[in-house]
Every structure is written in C-alpha cells, then in structure tokens.
Image (cartoon, grey):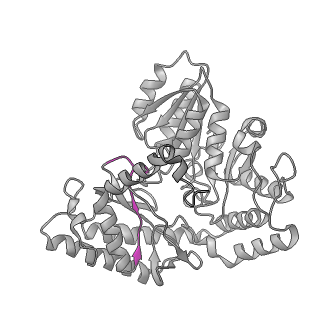
Amino acid sequence: MSADPTSDNAPATAFLRERLDALRRTGLARSLRHLRGMPGPTVRLNGREVLLLCSNNYLGLAGDERVKEAARRAVDSFGCGSTGSRLISGNLELYERLERELAAFKGAEAALVFTSGYQANVGTVSALAGPGDVIFSDALNHASLIDGSRLARAEIVVYGHCDAGDLETKLAKRTAARRRLILTESVFSMDGDLAPLVEINALAKQHGAMLMVDEAHATGVFGPNGAGRIEQLRLQGQVHIQMGTFSKALGSLGGYIAGSNDLIRFLLQQARSFVFTTGLPPAVLAASSEALRLVREEPQRRAALWRNVALLQEGLREREFPLGPAQSQILPVRCGEDRGTMAACRFLLRKGVFVQGIRPPTVPPGTSRLRIAASASHSEEQIGAALDAFSALRSVLRSRSKKFTRQDSGVLASIPSGT
C-alpha cells in the first residue's frame, strides 16, 4: 500500500492543491491562531499576552465566575453530554427553563434553542420558505441566512443594504408569490451598522410578508433590558421571527428563535437542523441561563461597553482611521486591499494588540478591514494602550507619505514584516 493516501488518486485530489495555491497567491489563505487561556480582555497568543480586541465577548460574560459556576453545577448534576437529538433523548430539563426565560426576555410567546446560531438560521429559513415563495434578503446578510435561503429553493431577491426604498420596490413587484419572507440582521456583523427596522417592519405589514430579524450581535447590547434592537425600538410582539445567539454577548454557545407558539411548534416539526442534530451539553444550557440573568440584572455591563466604544471611536477618528458607518460595538477600519489588511493586523499584533483582519469571502472584494470589537471588560488603560498601537501604525503610514483611505490603502502591504 502506498504511504501517501493521495498518490493513488492524484487526479481526483489535484484540485485541492490548486485551489490552496490560488488562495496563497491572492493573499486570501487563512490559518488558525492558537490562543491560550481564558478569553477576556487579554489572551495569550504565540507565547505572549496581548489585548484581545476582535472577540464577540462584548459583555465579558464568557469568563464570569457565576456563569462558570452554573456550568460546573450542571456537569455535576447532569453529566457532560445530552446523548441525543432533542426529539429522541436529548431534550434535557434545562432546555425548558432556558426557553421559558428566552421567551419572556424577547417578549414572545415561545422560544426554541438550536445547537448554533448558524443552525437556527439555516433551519428556520429553509423550513418557512420553498418553491413558489420569495425571500427578500439584505445584500450584506450573514452567510447562514444566505445558505438557508438557498436550501429553501425559493426565489431569492436581494435588496440594497439597509435600503428600505429598494425593498419596497421589490416587494411591490412580487405580489403573485405564495408567501414572502424578509430577512435582515439588526446589527450587521462586519460593518457594525444598523438596519432600519421600523421601516422594514412597516413594509412587512403593508405587503403581508413575514419578517425575520437576526439579533445575534444586538442581543445583550441594545435595549433597556439588553434584549436587542427590537426591544429598543419597541417592536416586540410585531416582528414575526426573532433570531439570536448565546455565543456573542452572552459568552456561551447556541442559537434560538423566538416567536409565536405556532411558529415554534412548526419549527420543531420542520427545521431539519433542529430535528437531526444532538442537543447542547448541560453545562452550556446552564451557562446560557445564568448569562441571560446577568444581562437582565446588570445594565452596568452595557454602560461599560458603550463607554469603551466611545473611547475607541474618538481615538481612532483622532488618528484619522476611517470607521465607515459603524453605529454599534463593532468598529471596522476599512483597508480595502487584502494583503495590506493582514500586514496591519501583524503590525498591531507585534505591538501587543490582536485585531483580526477580515477578507473575502467574509466581506465583499475590495472591502477588507480590521474588525475591532469593543468589550465591557477592557479597562480605560487597556483602551489607551490599544490606541497607542494604532498611533504607531499611523506613524508608519505617514512615514511613507501616504494617507490611509479606502482608495489608497495599498501602502499597508509595504510595511515590512519585521516592523
């Protein structure tokens, strides 16, 4: 037998190396960074402690002692795994409590927890729409909403990003559809901008369409109780389908859908990503319940987050870094060019600040960026240290007599690897 498992089947696998080589040539090849220790305001990376400014742990709950203790108690009481899908043997009693708490939190009749946010979106969209239906999707929706739409085999109509006028025009042209479903995020994960939910909700009512809002990056962050943009805009009870995750501000894992009793009963029957997957471990469910309690009862976490957001925004703008349309805790510094984006990422990391570069296909070509994510857990001194690193980056750019703009950002690629 050949020692190389691919040698006897080289023609069939040659495309793998070809595609990998192409990704490397274009600067789009990715690799994993090996982080050590508990995620918090800092993390160990490549043997040194660095500020972590690209995490979705917006409220610092991933390392909260009360959340960890809830997880430990659940392991002691229920073990490590759910041992089956929820419709067979995996529907642990912890689910009942979490879903009851979620429904109250989101102002809905009922809720259903999925194993991940991706599964929640894919399963829900593909269950609610099919041939003969039309899905209206924001141009910058998350991949999970796009993939769910493709699986549905419905007609997909993409409307301009956050453009309620374009959505209205396209809704008016699809009156013959059996059903119409509008999909949008409330806080867009790569630009940090906000969807015009009031206008979109009004259009859904006017045209008899269902509206599904992805609140993954809004839950815990917006609203008087942290329930998201829908709560902040007083739209609870009006939006048909509220989606969210535990893996962002709540520091745990899993996704959920909140809505009417009929919606939840329907998804329990028809959402394939719910039916055909193993339930979440007890520790995760208990941690999510505790994190949800802390979000409701500790508004000071959101206040600390927004203070840090303001400090970062002001400091970055003083240093002439373009933040684009950011209206949330997500602050994108647009670089445009892929290699330059990663050069800036490496430069900042050498200065002790980990801000990941984001490239296609996560974002459209020509819009690569440094995605800065503020957290409540960072101190004012740590925010200052991060801004010092950006000052150093700005000095490097100025020394090359270049201005950092979307049109002329290729200078970043000229930063030597040892700078």
Residue at x 53%, y 33% (from the top left corner): 202
Q: Is residue 255 left or right of residue 99?
A: left
Residue that sits furthest to the left in the current view:
401
Q: Is residue 259 visible?
A: no
169 lies above or below 402: above
Give the magenta range.
353-365
- Classify the position of the N terminus by image quarter: bottom right
Q: Is residue 416 visible?
A: yes
Q: Is residue 259 left or right of residue 309?
A: right
Residue at x 77%, y 40% (from the top left corner): 268
Q: Position of residue 373 (x, y in %)?
A: 45, 65
Q: Position of residue 391 (x, y in %)?
A: 27, 76
Residue at x 47%, y 44% (from the top left corner): 11
Q: How many marks?
A: 0
Q: Position of residue 231 (x, y in %)?
A: 60, 51
Q: Position of residue 259 (x, y in %)?
A: 70, 42
